[in-house]
Amino acid sequence: MRKAGGVTVDRTAAWLSAPDSLASPAAPAFPAAPDSLASPASAVEVRADSVRKLSVTVIVPAFNEELGLPDTLDSLLRQTVRPDRVIVVDDCSTDRTGDIARRYGVEVLRPSRNLGSKAKAQNYALPSCDTELVLPVDADTALADDYIERIVVPFRDPAVVVAAGNVQTKITKSMTERGRSIEYLFGFHFYRPIQNLANSPVVCSGCCAAFRRRELVEFGGFPERTIVEDMDYTWSQQIAGRKAVYVGGATAWAADPSTVYYLRKQVWRWQAGFFQNVRIHWRGLMRHKPVLGMWIGLALWDILTAPAWWVSPVVMPLFFHMSIGEVIFWWIGLESVLLLPPLMYACVRRRLNPAVVLCNVPFVYFNKLINTYYAWKAIVVELVLVPLGISRGLVVYEKGR
């Protein structure tokens, strides 16, 4: 162990040959996605040993993550292609986060003061990285055993600078977690594959996205100008003519808000960050990446029309001479036609129990109401009040759990 510039650095070479006994016995076993289920939308999802191995550094930003960190590090130990380095940024935690990381024999960086956001913590570790790829992994996220093996493959294309896999809900016990599980299943098995086919992913999820280090450093590191660095970088690089890729066969499980209190915090950050990026990038999208701009326009249309859709069972009987029962029947029918096919495909793809998934569907509508409220709030704050100089917008990063 040594100290340099106020930073405590613990480097242990044993990481690359760490014995299985280091793994926590309570850690859940997250299976690797079977090859037979590889996404047809991404022909590059083949075994990584067919191409030159790319060196990878995993960065784990962590603030008071003693509960979730063991699962994350256990999943890294189980990788079929081990990372060359693992750096945990202990962002001045007040719990045992740093001690747990050192027990696993990984490198630990601890700044002299709390940095205040995930992007800043990742940037703190970036100068210590010397590998071709950098893979930030949230300290509450577990990777499938073959995640790194699959996520590195798209980088055989030199135009690819960022890639991320399929994110699923790690725990589905509370109402908000069950609703989020449906959001993820739908989004990652409907929107994301289509966007990938159009070479225009809207975001490479920051909890498990891999970045080409050279381009990331040239860009100035992980963006700190918005509250959602993953979306900011995904849009910026595509506008610059580079590629972002969704790798459907690479699976990660993320911990999501277990209470309404934390769901509100997370959704507000996501929605505010989305419209911060709209404000910053809309000209570049129109000029250089119109297809990505189209997806963002569709998302905006969905947000603007959502209130009308929610009140339609009450309003439509006044104009179409239909009973409330008939309107609700058609409303539920249209929702089912749009929602169920992608969910059933997700059940087959992820080998999930359809009955369990269907039981979680009602909870997604509560989450949608929260999403709609904060999306409209973000439009007002980030697209109206900020340009007028009335508000600074959302600048404080708060964890969503």
Image: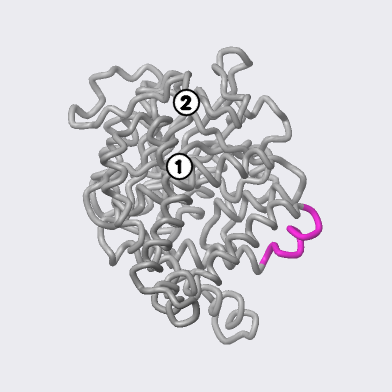
Residue 25 picture location, percent across and down: 18, 27
Q: Which residue ends up furthest to the right in the rendered image?
A: 287
Position in image of residue 130 (x %, y %): 58, 32
Classify the position of the N terminus by image quarter: top left
Q: Is residue 113 magenta?
A: no
Left or right, residue 254 beside residue 96: right
Q: Which residues are magenta?
A: 280-288
**What percent of the width, then of the height, locates residue 20?**
27, 18
Between residues 273 and 305, which one lies in front from this camera angle? 305
Q: Quadrant of residue 139 in the image?
A: top left
Question: Which residue occupies the foreground of this view, 354 or 64?
Answer: 354
Residue 139 horizontal side relative to residue 295, left or right: left
The residue identified by callout 1 is 341
* Amino acid marked by disc 1: Pro
Q: Residue at x 48, y 30 (%)?
A: 250
Q: Is residue 109 above or below residue 27?
A: below
Which image quarter holds the C terminus? Answer: bottom left
Q: Which residue was labeled with disc 2?
A: 83
Quick one: SS at disc 1? Answer: helix
Above or below — where is 306 with respect to 5?
A: below
Q: Is residue 109 visible?
A: no
The three-letter code of the residue at mark 2 reads: Pro
Q: Is residue 295 left or right of 123 when viewed as pictured? A: right
SS class, disc 2? loop
Locate residue 126: give its quadrant: top right
Magenta stretch secondary structure, dominant: helix
